[in-house]
Image (cartoon, helix red, strand yellow):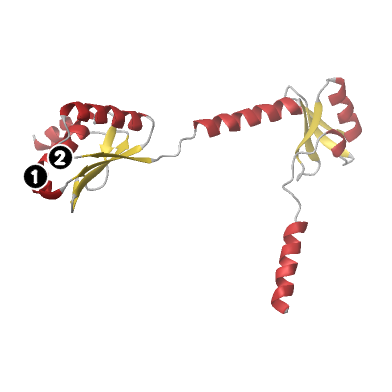
Amino acid sequence: MAIEERISQNSMQKQQQPPPQRERINEQIRVPQVQVIDQSGTNLGLMPTIQAKGLAAEAGLDLVEVSGKTLPSVCKIMDYGKVKYAQAKKRHAAKKHHHAVKTKNVRMTPNTEENDLRTKLTQVRKFLTQGDKVTLEVRFKGREVRHASRGREVLETLIAGTEDLSSVEGRGIEHQGKRMFVTLAPGTKPKKSTEKSAATTS
């Protein structure tokens, strides 16, 4: 019974928690005095809230509480609707340009012909350009596994064809049972300076 009561109390407390506080504007601001910053950024100093609301109304703008935790509250005269629209537009643009990295799989056989290999290369380059990782995989059937070197050649061909767009992840080409694979990540790793190594050996 005691456990049920605690669960009930916790659920009631969650329901009673107020939503995240938003900026108070215009008539929502009920403190007697506020520190006012006008639309050009000039600090107008401390004044009665009713006077600050009047200044905002004369300018055809809003009085927005930008810091309600200070004493006195700091308010700014601005076009609140325009500011909120700009913020929403910025969030939408950031969300639109955010790209979740995915891993694409491209499968082949050790006997993949040259024309098909070129098609696979075009596909892999497209994935890498989009910011996705690519796992290249060669599948062996039956006795094909005896010719693992051919599968490695297929993978190395695609690695060489994408070296300007990608870098090899992990331990490079791996061979497990009837599959040989390697994962490419978008972006190239910086090459070591040959000049620096030559200077140290001289």
Quarter in which the N terminus is drawn: bottom right
Location of residue 110 in the rendering, given as x and y in whole percent from the top left corner: 15, 39
For marks 1 and 2, the one nearer the N-term is 2
Task: Count the marks.
Answer: 2
**Rendered residue at 19%/26% (across/down):** 115
In the picture, measured across the screen, residue 135 lies left or right of residue 44, that is left
Q: Quadrant of residue 39?
A: top right
Question: What's the residue type where badge 2 is placed?
Answer: Pro
Q: Nearer the viewer, residue 115 or 132?
A: 115
Location of residue 47 in the rendering, given as x and y in whole percent from the top left corner: 87, 33
Is residue 69 shown above or below 8?
above
**Rendered residue at 33%/28% (across/down):** 126
Location of residue 17 in the rendering, given as x and y in whole percent from the top left corner: 75, 56
Q: Residues within 10 Å of mark 2 (few under 14, many from 20)?
A: many
In the picture, measured across the screen, residue 99 lies left or right of residue 120, that is right
Location of residue 101 in the rendering, given as x and y in whole percent from the top left corner: 41, 39
Q: Quadrant of residue 86?
A: top right
Question: What's the residue type where badge 1 is placed?
Answer: His
Q: Residues within 10 Å of mark 1 (few under 14, many from 20)?
A: few
Residue 189 seen in render: no
Look at the numbered discs 1 and 2 and tell me whether their residues touch, using CB distance below 8 Å: yes
**Rendered residue at 68%/27% (across/down):** 85
Q: Residue furthest front?
A: 142
Query: Which disc is residue 110 wearing?
Result: 2
**Residue that badge 1 annotates:** 147
Residue 11 seen in render: yes
Mark 1 → mark 2, Cα distance in angstroms: 8 Å
